[in-house]
Image: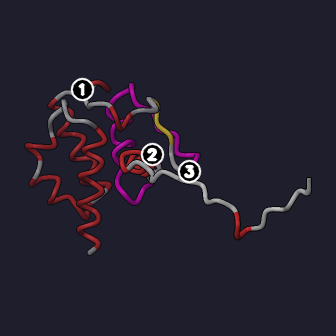
Amino acid sequence: MKRTKRTQSNRRPKKVAPPDPLTLLDRAARRRDASDGALELAVALASLTTLVQVDLRPTPFRTEPADLFDRTFSSVGLNEDQMGFLREQLKLSLPAIAAELDTNSQVLDQPAHRIGDYAQFLKVALLLKIK
């Protein structure tokens, strides 16, 4: 029995399932950087509560708790009054979108909101300012 060598042309292509869009979105969310407002949000949170820490040494930065952007503001110790302080700090660190932060303050200043959703608002607002 002779053994024949398979060539590139007679190999069967492997079937690869397309990636799940939610998985891709989750991966993209984990690769946050300073240009999307996530770093500024994390630093502002760390300045307002001892329940959040930010390590700026690695790229991308790391937070404690690691799932910070999946949590709500109230779960890291912020109340409604502190949400106003958070907004003021973000206006200082992201002056290009200060007006948008004020305009949407009634919606944004809710401690029950997910931190990742707030970060998404910052990202979109920053992108709209660039264009």
- In magenta, the rendered stretch is 33-59
Say which residue appears at 46% left-offset and 32% top-offset: 66
Q: Quadrant of residue 93?
A: bottom left
Is 71 situated left or right of 125 in this image?
A: right
Q: Is residue 65 above or below residue 105?
A: above
Hey, what amino acid is under mark 3? Answer: Thr
Q: CA distance from mark 1 to mark 2?
A: 21 Å
User: Which residue occupies the foreground of this view, 124 or 85?
Assistant: 124
Is 103 situated left or right of 92 in this image?
A: left
Marks 1 and 2 in Cβ contact (< 8 Å): no
- Residue assigned mark 3: 59
User: Disc number at residue 30?
Assistant: 2
| Mark 2 crowd level (few <14, some 14–19, many ≥20, 10 Å Cα) | some
Upstream in sequence: badge 3 or badge 1: 3
Q: CA distance from mark 3 to mark 1?
A: 27 Å
Say which residue appears at 35% left-offset and 38% top-offset: 69
Label 1's element? helix
| Residue 81 highlighted magenta (yes or no) | no
* Residue 38 x %, y %: 37, 49
* Residue 8 x %, y %: 73, 68
- Residue assigned mark 1: 74
Say which residue appears at 18% left-offset and 30% top-offset: 112
Q: CA distance from mark 2 to mark 3?
A: 11 Å
Q: Is residue 81 above or below residue 128?
A: above
